[in-house]
Structure formats: C-alpha cells, structure tokens
Amino acid sequence: MKITAIKTAATVGHGMHLWVRVSTDAGIVGTGECVHGGKQAIAIIQYLEEKLVGRDPFAVDAIFEDMRRSHVFDGGDAGALITALTGIEIALWDLKGKALDVPVYELLGGKFRDKIRVYADCEVSPGMNFDQIKGVVDEVLERGFTALKIDVDIGAYGHRESEVAHFEKDRFNFTANQWEHERMVSLVDMVTRAAGRDIDVAADVHTRLDVPSSIRLAKALEQYHLMWLEEPVPAENVDAMRTVTQSTSVPICSGENLYLRLGFRDLLEKQAVNIIMPDIPKCGGLSECRKIANMAEIYYIPFAPHNVSSPVGTLASAHVCATVPNFLILEYHWLHRDYWSTIIQEKTDIIKDGFIHFDGRPGIGVELDEEVGRQYQYPGTTWFE
C-alpha cells in the first residue's frame, strides 16, 4: 500500500479546525484533525504532499520523524510545522486502523480503561452573579459531567462590560490588582458552591499573571480543593512555573502550548507542575503524546490533555488516553456548538454522561460528514482539493 494524496479542508470552530485526508492506492482513506496551525499548516501540508506520495502509510512514526528532522531549520521542534505533521500523523493512524480492522488504541498497546472521563469547559465569566453561574453549572451537571473548568482571568473570553471599567490598566502588565484578585477568588467560590462537593472544578488563568500574583491567587484558592489551577504564568519559563507550584497545595497544570517530548522535558524533570495537559491534535499526535504521558508517569504526574477539537480529534485523543496508566481527564470545549454531533456521519454524541465509551470500530471510530462540514468551511480555504 502506498500514499497517493494528502489533502486538507478547514472548518470554523475554536479558531480553525484543519482536516487532513490521506489516500492510498488500496482505496483506504484516513482522516485526521489538527488545531491552532492556521493557514500556515495548510501550506505546509500542501508542500509535504509531494514528499509523502509513494510512502508506506503504515510507517507512521518514521514518516513523522523523517519530515520533522528534514525540516528542523524550518521550525522542526514547535509551531505550525509540528501541528501540520500532527494532522497527517492522526490521519495515518486512522488509515492503519481501518486497513487492519482494529481501533487505534489496539495499535498503541491496548486499553488500560474502557471509558474516558471528560470535563466540560464552561462559559462562566467574572461578570456573572451566583444565580447566573448556577444556571450554567446546573446545565453541565444535567448532562452527566462530574467535572468542569472555568476561566477566572478577567481578560478572558466573555467578560462583562461592567467589568471593563475596573480593568482599565496596562494590558501588558501581569500583576493582578486587589479588585482583580478578589474577583477571581469570588468566581471560584461561587462556582464551587454551585457545583457541590462531589464535582471537580478546575480554574484557568491563561498565563495572564506574574509570579507574585499567581502565588497570591493559588494560596487564596487552597480552601476550595480545585482539581487544578491552569497556567497561572506562561509556560516558557519553567523555573517561574516551578516557583508557583512549590508555593501552594493547589495542583498546577500546564502544557497546552508546548510541543513534542522536547517541550515537556524541563517541565517534567524539574517537576515544575503537578499535572500536564498537552494538546494532542496540535503538539505531535497520538504516538508522540503517548510518549509524553509515559515520561510524565516516571514522575507520577497525571496526564490531562487539553482539547478544543471536534469529535474526530476528541476521539483520537481518547485513544491515547485509553492506553496510558496516568490518564486523569480529557477536556471538552464544545458545550454550545450546534454541529458537535452533526459534523460526523454517526450523528451521535460521542460523550455520554461525562464519559467517552469505545465501540470497537476500526481506526479513530468516526467519520467527517463533509456536507455539514462545508456549511462551516473556513473562509479562504479549499475543500480537499
């Protein structure tokens, strides 16, 4: 079997969702998804196609590493190149699973678990009062989720106009003022009260604080027993992250903007976080992220992948989560997208009562519905041409 073509399509979602289709001379096709690569990733895949036509599609790791090393001077350790290779890699695993008539998790070593726990990223913002927050939380709990995440930084998406007047400060300064600090703590307080003791709550800061502000916030949140506090400071400075982590009993989580095992090495070796969260359809793909999880296991650090993908990328991530012992929980970021279930041919929600269950279908296990996808086609992109 040989690769005959690699084509892309893109839809609007959490930014751009880039679909990658690998075709073969045997008529077997694999579909992958990657995120946050933008139109740069499309151009890279178009460029790589001629280098990959004629290759054995079963040599997934060799293809990935060959392309990465061949372009090491073009960003071979991070960014759009790695994201583009990730989309190809996931499509190759889907293709290989279909060709061998087995689910991808069997090709990755088999399952440690039969279902994957998922948490819901909620549209809760610092401008809401308790009743508004309880309404959002109740909706999540009614759908069967046992864990959720909120954005606590005032500059996050969806902040209320009433908040803006209090937030008129230097936007490049990461120091939280007194009002901002108290507002973040108040938000966590309201959400945890609305959720109750049996529901896990995580809080995301989107790297928007400096070290003193992060430490102050983390200490104030210790009483709420959070599942984690996410990226209080940027992940680029591992020592700064470690300083925050060592200052508090609140678990600190980071990693959504790191790439490959190389990107996680210092974070893990210095034990600068308590939980890692690689974005699987972005930072290297299924095989690479399984290796990242295995590295983390050496330090007894849980693996809780970041995820803003469609059902295709989400289920692809779930295959990795099934095959590592230190999996904690997987993110779900599509609570209010009408096409979550309709963009796949199966027309079903892959998440039921807060868990993803595998049905044993070969490859990733779901197929893109192109007719629906075209309705959300990303402006200025082609459709598998």
Image: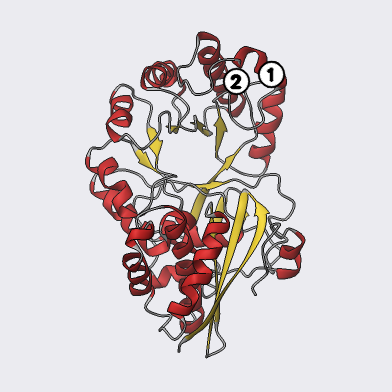
Instruction: Say how the picture is coloured.
Output: secondary structure
Q: Where is residue 82? Give x, y as percent.
A: 42, 59
- Classed neighbour count for the residue bearing mark 1: other residues with Cα under 10 Å, few (<14), some (14–19), many (≥20): few
Tell me, yes or no, if residue 97 can be seen here: yes
Please give the label number shown on residue 190. 2
Tell me, yes or no, if residue 357 can be seen here: no
What's the amino acid at mark 1? Asn
Q: Quadrant of the C terminus?
A: bottom right
Left/right of residue 200 with respect to residue 383 in the rendered view:
left
Quadrant housing residue 65: bottom left
Looking at this view, is 58 or 248 the one in front?
Answer: 58
Q: Where is residue 101? Give x, y as percent.
A: 49, 81
Residue extending furthest toward the front: 73
What's the amino acid at mark 2? Met
Left/right of residue 86 with respect to residue 179 in the rendered view:
left
**Residue at x 35% of width, y 37% of height:** 236
Quadrant housing residue 361: bottom right
Image marks 1 and 2: residues in contact by CB distance under 8 Å: yes
Q: Is residue 263 above or below residue 272?
A: below
**Residue at x 23% of width, y 49% of height:** 298
Looking at this view, is 3 or 122 the one in front?
Answer: 3
Quote the CA–CA distance across marks 1 and 2. 8 Å
Question: What is the secondary structure assignment of the residue under circle 1?
Answer: loop
Q: Which residue is mark 1?
A: 129
